[in-house]
Amino acid sequence: MANPSTLMVEIDDRYIVITMSGTSFRASYFASPNSPGLTRSDWMTENGGASMSRTDFLKLAAEAAHAKAHELGWLVEGGHE
């Protein structure tokens, strides 16, 4: 599995966008008022140049997005702020 440090985490308005350098992997997440956590809004996961599977990328992306959401105060334990 690739090193999580190759993930790029960016904020675009209300979205947390996760990409992996050297690949076309991309996933976006947002905090929905109808959900206690983050919702994945879109993703592009063609395996061009990636040394991991789409499933592994999406798992790492979700973990990175949740960590960033907590850091930003978008989520607190048990749901939204």
Image (cartoon, helix red, strand yellow):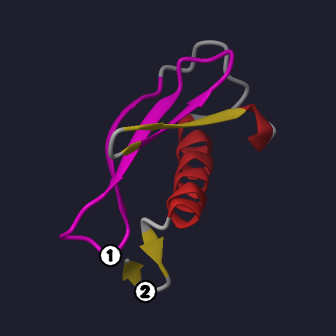
Is residue 63 depicted above or below 15 in this figure?
Answer: below
- Give the image location of residue 18, x and y in percent: 53, 37
- The residue at 62%/49% (across/down) is 60
Q: Which is more toward the observer, 1 or 66?
A: 66
- The residue at 48%/29% (across/down) is 26
In contact (CB < 8 Å): disc 2 and disc 1: yes
Magenta-tinted stretch? 16-45
Magenta-colored segment: predominant secondary structure? strand
Q: Which is more toward the observer, 53 or 26?
A: 26
The amino acid type found where label 2 is placed reads: Gly
Sort mark 1 into few (<14), some (14-19) or many (20+) by Cα contacts within 10 Å.
Answer: some
Q: Earlier in the sequence, mark 2 or mark 1?
A: 1
SS class, disc 1:
loop
Quadrant housing residue 52: top right
Q: Quadrant of the N terminus?
A: top right
Query: Which numbered marker is on residue 78?
Result: 2
Relative side of 19 to 51, left or right: left
* Residue hosting label 1: 36
